[in-house]
Amino acid sequence: MTTQPTQRPAYVPPVPLSSVPATAPMSGFPGGPVPPVNAPGGRRVSWPGVVALILVVLLLGVTAFQAYQVNRLGNELDETRARAAADVSAADKRVEAVEKQLATQFNAEKIAAKTLPSVFRVRTPESIGSAFAVGTASDGGTNLLTNFHVIEDVWNDGTKKVKIEHADQLYDATVVAGDKKADIAQLHTTAKIEGLKVAATESKSGQEILVVGSPLGLKDTVTSGVVSAFREETTQHGPYIQFDAPINPGNSGGPVINANYEVIGIASAKFTDAEGLGLAIPIKIACDKFTIC
């Protein structure tokens, strides 16, 4: 049988606070003061610096976006300029084509205005006809073409002197060459007169023409019509141009003009018993004969 202790365990009495040394460590006891917690690395976060960094990043982003926009707009502007230049070029070509087309349109008023100053009435003692200046005027004067039958009387009597008139202008001229068979003659005057251009190609049926001359002595007269045909067959005077513009005595020697302000022939005759049957000597015959065109 076990014997029970007769004495109970005694509690350890608490230590009076006054007996605890003032330097005793307190951090390890519950309820003691908590030491301060420091940031990693021992440094605190600087919020103004963080905000500044964010602003820099945002500004860089905005700048990059603006640079992209500027570049894109620049490319679009270049494309727009290229399209505009192409449109202008296309428009210029269309205008040029229209101008060329208009240049070939027959305008009797403009043709007359350009042609009349170069066309003269020819007066001899026995006849009145027409003549026109060709080639480039020089200090030596101007050459003109007409029909031989217009100046035949002064050719035959040897004087070879005629008067040529236009508006209030009156000049002396000399017959320097003639071909009776071809019915063409060359005059020369010391006056400087602008010459008409001659056509490099043969006339075609249907071409509109203007005939300038002095029918019955009436100066500065124009009539219009079309080329009826180009007759290749050889007659007394060789091939000829048939046209329907009205002509009368005095028109002989005058120019037949196309829409390009070029001489295609020399009006020389008409059928008196028919309407609209005029004849002209192709200009090439006179130019080849006298080499003054």
Image (cartoon, rainbow, N blue to C red):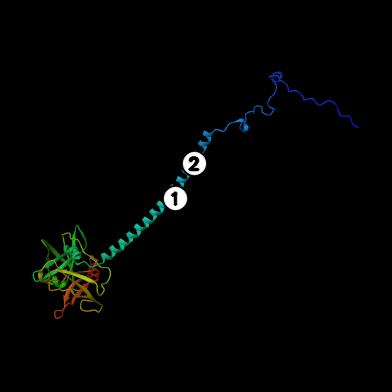
Seen from the viewer's position, the closer of residues 96 and 17 is 17
Quadrant occupied by the N terminus: top right
Q: Is residue 179 visible to us here?
A: no
Q: Residues within 10 Å of mark 1 (few under 14, many from 20)?
A: few
Q: Which mark is residue 58?
A: 2
Q: Is residue 61 visible to us here?
A: yes
* Residue at the spot 16% in from the left edge and 75% down from the top edge: 269
Q: Which residue is at the far right? A: 1
Q: Residues within 10 Å of mark 2 (few under 14, many from 20)?
A: few
Q: Estimate the x, y position of residue 212 in percent, counting from the top left.
A: 16, 68
Q: Which mark is residue 36?
A: none
* Residue at the spot 49% in from the left edge and 43% down from the top edge: 61
Q: Which residue is at the far left? A: 125
Quarter where residue 2 is shown: top right
Quarter where residue 265 is shown: bottom left
Q: Mark 2 or 1 closer to N-term?
A: 2
State left or right for residue 250 relative to residue 61.
Answer: left
CA gap between label 2 and label 1 equals 21 Å
Is 27 placed above or below 197 here?
above
* Residue at the spot 29% in from the left edge and 63% down from the top edge: 98
Seen from the viewer's position, the closer of residues 20 and 225 is 20
Q: Estimate the x, y position of residue 226 in percent, counting from the top left.
A: 21, 73
Is 145 placed above or below 240 here?
above
Q: Which residue is at the far bottom? A: 273
> What element does badge 2 sit on?
helix
Circle 1 sits on which residue? 72
Which amino acid type is shown beneath numbered disc 2? Leu
* Residue at the spot 36% in from the left edge and 55% down from the top edge: 84
Seen from the viewer's position, the closer of residues 85 and 150 is 85
Please report contact status of discs 2 and 1: CB closer than 8 Å, yes or no.
Answer: no
Which amino acid type is shown beneath numbered disc 1? Arg
Is 280 placed above or below 113 here?
below
